[in-house]
Image: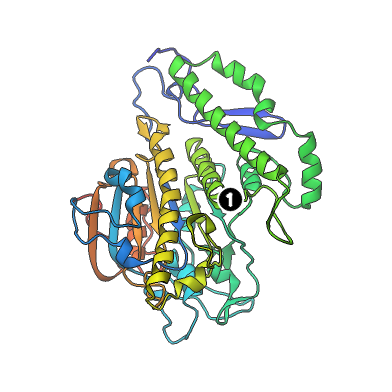
């Protein structure tokens, strides 16, 4: 590496009118003489899949390293050495516990909180603080955003959505506190502006659209600052900055293309501004926004709901025109199970795109995946029986060396999934006494 006495701060921004673009970690951010490289941030992400899974097509039969990939996990086989299949963990607070129906609401509300939600469709909702928000509180001031909550389904928090449970329970997995659910942002444009711009989100969409006509590209605003920066860094850093800015530009173009497309999703339903019509494009765009947020250290904690619990999205692109939620009540009918397995597999294919991008994005002396912990799964296993035991869970990344992937780990029955969260937090240097119903840490993530 070419050494100079010039040293960039990790918080260096490319400033422009109405925008501030953070940079990825560069060689120039390392002190030139004598000092060791600073410890790189560990990122934590939760990707939630709704309505359960076909567990027979999900769960490998063998434990350890030499397991065979099942049909649903097959799209992730290229990432064998980067993933852990976790079998046996449970979310007991998703069960009825005397409250009757409402398993979908309880699944989402308790998945990251480990708390049994109060059964109500009114304003007196109550759950607990979610794992991501425990981490976010520790990140306050360290990054521009303490956390980022994303979703790909509507996310209203009022009304009744599941057998007497408020929609607040089914439509988010994030809770800032026991009575404060955090709705996911579903519009990629607003996510982009939250990361890089200073758009006023309180104004109506028409006003934002008029303002957008007069706003130049965020990168154009910062062009002069970028050119100056390029003269201060070495060839390796120039390549990193160029690749990073190219990725931002591509996201901008994809959002702009979605906004200019005036077609409708279904007859008489207007397409929301900035949301691609094809679900695959939508999901990949949300994943790409997280890549950029992690790369620039804008946040270290994200959650993504692939769909809300009870989602009725259809998937004709994979030959499933049936609504997801009704199909999940398959009654063990082979044709219904096959369709549900197709949906599970499609979600895994799209998630594989995210993992591949994390693995190909440089970050310090490794990649983003090396310095991340990404949990993929949901709060229901067998969707027909509404089981909250033996959850479908996959863990990706190495947590900066604290996790040894490449295995299928089988835990004893009824080990709380919150024990996993407590363990992951420890790998980030965060050590709360408990997370919901946790009663300890999980073993074997580090092969110890």
The residue shown at (79%, 40%) is 211
Compared with 110, 80 (above or below) is: above
124 vs 35, left or right, is right
289 vs 397, left or right, is right
The residue shown at (37%, 53%) is 425
Is residue 205 shown to the viewer in this render?
A: yes
Q: Which residue is mark 1?
A: 278
Compared with 306, 162 (above or below) is: below
The residue shown at (63%, 79%) is 122
- Relative depth, front residue between 368 and 66: 66
The residue shown at (41%, 76%) is 384
Secondary structure found at label 1? loop
The scheme the figure's colours follow is: rainbow
Q: Counting other residues with Cα less than 10 Å from the Cα at mark 1, is it few (<14), some (14-19), or many (20 or more)?
A: few
Image position, residue 51 (x, y; %): 46, 68
Compared with 298, 365 (above or below) is: above
Is residue 179 shown to the viewer in this render?
A: no
Image position, residue 57 (x, y; %): 32, 63
304 vs 167, left or right, is left
Image position, residue 296 (x, y; %): 51, 35
Compared with 357, 137 (above or below) is: below
Quadrant showing the N terminus: top left
The tally of labels here is 1
Image position, residue 171 (x, y; %): 56, 66
């Amino acid at each position: 590496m070419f050494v100079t006495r010039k040293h960039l701060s990790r918080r260096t921004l490319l400033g422009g009118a109405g925008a501030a673009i953070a940079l990825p970690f560069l060689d120039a951010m390392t002190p030139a003489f004598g000092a060791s490289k600073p410890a790189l941030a560990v990122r934590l992400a939760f990707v939630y899949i709704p309505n359960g899974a076909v567990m027979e097509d999900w769960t490998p039969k063998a434990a350890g390293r030499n397991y065979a990939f099942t049909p649903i996990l097959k799209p992730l086989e290229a990432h064998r050495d980067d993933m852990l299949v976790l079998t046996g963990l449970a979310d007991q607070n998703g069960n009825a516990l005397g409250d009757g129906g409402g398993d979908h609401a309880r699944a989402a509300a308790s998945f990251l909180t480990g708390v049994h939600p109060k059964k109500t469709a009114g304003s007196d909702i109550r759950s607990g603080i979610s794992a991501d928000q425990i981490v976010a509180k520790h990140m306050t001031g360290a990054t521009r955003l303490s956390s980022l909550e994303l979703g790909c389904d509507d996310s209203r928090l009022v009304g009744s959505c599941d057998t007497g449970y408020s929609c607040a329970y089914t439509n988010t997995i994030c809770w800032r506190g026991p009575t404060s659910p955090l709705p996911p942002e579903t519009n990629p444009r607003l996510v982009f502006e939250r990361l890089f711009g200073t758009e006023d989100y309180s104004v109506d969409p028409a006003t934002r659209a008029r303002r957008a006509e007069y706003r130049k590209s965020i990168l154009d605003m910062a062009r002069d600052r970028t050119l100056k920066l390029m003269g201060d860094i070495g060839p390796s850093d120039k390549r990193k900055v160029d690749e990073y800015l190219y990725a931002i530009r591509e996201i901008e173009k994809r959002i702009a293309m979605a906004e200019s497309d005036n077609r409708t999703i279904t007859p008489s339903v207007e397409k929301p501004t900035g949301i691609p019509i094809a679900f695959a494009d939508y999901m990949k765009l949300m994943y790409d926004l997280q890549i950029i947020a992690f790369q620039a250290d804008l946040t270290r904690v994200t959650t993504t709901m692939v769909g809300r619990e009870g989602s009725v999205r259809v998937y004709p692109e994979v030959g499933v025109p049936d609504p997801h939620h009704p199909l999940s009540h398959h009654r063990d009918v082979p044709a219904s199970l096959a369709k549900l397995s197709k949906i599970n597999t499609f979600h895994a294919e799209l998630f594989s795109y995210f993992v591949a991008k994390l693995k190909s994005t440089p970050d310090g002396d490794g990649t983003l995946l090396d310095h991340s912990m990404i949990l993929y799964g949901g709060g229901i296993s067998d969707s027909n029986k509404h089981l909250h035991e033996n959850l479908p869970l996959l863990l990706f990344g190495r947590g900066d060396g604290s996790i040894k992937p490449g295995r299928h780990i089988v835990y004893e029955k009824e080990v709380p999934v919150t024990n996993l969260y407590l363990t992951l937090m420890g790998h980030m240097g965060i050590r709360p006494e408990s997370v919901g119903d946790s009663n300890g840490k999980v073993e074997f993530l580090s092969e110890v």
